[in-house]
Image (cartoon, rainbow, N blue to C red):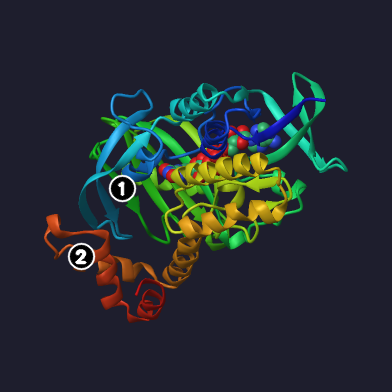
Amino acid sequence: MPDIDVLVVGAGPAGSVAAWQARQAAPELDVVLLERDRAVGAPVRCAEGVGDAGLREFASPEGTDWAARKITRVIFLAPDGTEVKVAERNVGWVLDRTRFDAHLAAEARAAGAEVLVATEATGMSRNGDGRWHVRVKSGGIEETWRARVVIGADGVETMVGRWAGLDTRVPSRDMESCAQYVLQGIACDPDAIYLQFGDAIAPGGYAWIFPKGIGVANVGLGLVALKTNGRNARQYLDDWIDRRYPGAARTGYTVGGVIVHTTIKQTFTDGVLIAGDAAHMINPLSGGGIVNAMKAGRLAGCVAASAIREGDTGARRLSAYHHSWMDLLGDDHLKYYKIKQALEDLDDSFFNGLARTVNKIPEGKRSLGRIFTHALIKHPQLIPIAAKFFV
Ligand SMILES: Cc1cc2nc3c(=O)[nH]c(=O)nc-3n(C[C@H](O)[C@H](O)[C@H](O)COP(=O)(O)OP(=O)(O)OC[C@H]3O[C@@H](n4cnc5c(N)ncnc54)[C@H](O)[C@@H]3O)c2cc1C
């Protein structure tokens, strides 16, 4: 029976960074990264946008083949179509996730981790020897491997958390259904990402245009199924694209779920850590999870490595991971979640009015902070929430 120190399930951003950082922290450990798909990074279920600062903690985008487009502007579109341009330098990047995820897995491999594709974890149980016995399937053959620490980085549909007895359920109001096309030959600012709000466009969520080049963009939307009139995300998206870009060529299509919730109550147990989407570590306001997943993966890899070195992989020792995550971002997500709930009560007319007020601020002086301040002035019921969490 193969005996592994750290077994990482899932080679998305969380898993690859976890394997990379675990090996870097403790090069003597056997670290294995499993990916059930036949290639790391494919298929892509993502709009591929990341903030500049967060990305740079892990990789420099300049001159790489995995950074598709530098973004220097955000354009908000109110439900009535009013545009609000927010100019900031170095806002972020639109990645090529197929290449980016492969790049992170290559970092893990370069650090000495073994990366296995087309290899799936199918179940696991705790054994009397204090190790997890993980069933691993590859090429139609199933084996059992022993692991000191299992890192569950297996995304939205996580099973590792459940196998370990952790509660990873998602309330249906906090699960967004997303649909996205790659559109070719469209007119949009190639240096800007667009975010469009509106109950008729994407109820409970928003629509996006994330350019990957001149005239090429990921165009999609996420919505909360409970808030729709029975139509699915693809139908809403088709309607929006037919109005905005009639005749555009649709050269790619993807669907996926985004958990806009808060971090699961417990991300650890004896010999197990859960990271990234699997632990609901997505920003509940924006739905962004790539950088969060990498940050969680880094914490998980480092805590697993030092716990093994110390000879204690029990729940109490591994709880350090949960506390570090909550200090880093998890507590902020609780605040963002409250704001999300407050925004849910506001209707289209609020956002239309806000867009017109914000447009009175000179373009160079518009920032997300100022927009938020205007939102508070226009809608005083947000003030107690802001006061509670921001002051
Ligand atoms: C439509 C859409 C648009 C999005 N747009 C953005 C965006 O623009 N910016 C942003 O920051 N975030 C975005 N997100 C969210 C982002 O994609 C995720 O937050 C991010 O990929 C999370 O990384 P992860 O490593 O936790 O999980 P994932 O990237 O989902 O990786 C999990 C991996 O685990 C593998 N796996 C699962 N089970 C097993 C198993 N049993 N054995 C082996 N392997 C397994 C999967 O195949 C997968 O490769 C979007 C999501 C969707 C659906």
- Mark positioned earlier in the residue sequence (1 or 2): 1
Residue type, mark 1 in image: Tyr
State the residue in front, 110 or 77: 110
* Image position, residue 69 (x, y; %): 30, 33
Tell me the residue that label 2 is attached to: 358
The part of the image, by quadrant, that contains residue 389 is bottom left
Q: Secondary structure at mark 2?
A: helix
Q: Quadrant of ligand 1?
A: top right
Please say if 109 is above or below 377: above
Dot 2, crowdedness within 10 Å: few (<14), some or many (≥20)? many
Please say if 351 is above or below 164: below
Contact? badges 1 and 2 (CB < 8 Å): no
- What residue do we see at 66% from left, 35% from top? 6
State the residue in front, 177 or 125: 125
Measured Cα–Cα span from mark 1 to mark 2? 16 Å
The part of the image, by quadrant, that contains residue 192 is top left
- What residue do we see at 61% from left, 39% from top? 305
Dot 1, crowdedness within 10 Å: few (<14), some or many (≥20)? many
Is residue 353 toward the left or the right of residue 256 in the image?
left
* Image position, residue 51 (x, y; %): 35, 45
Tell me the residue that label 1 is attached to: 194
Is residue 307 toward the left or the right of residue 63 in the image?
right
| Label disc, if present, on residue 306 of the rendered structure | none
User: Seen from this angle, which residue lies furthest front?
Assistant: 310
- What residue do we see at 42% from left, 69% from top? 343
Give the position of the N terminus as an image quadrant. Answer: top right
* Image position, residue 356 (x, y; %): 21, 66
Is residue 60 toward the left or the right of residue 250 in the image?
left
Q: Secondary structure at mark 1?
A: strand
Residue type, mark 2 in image: Val
Please say if 15 is above or below 335: above
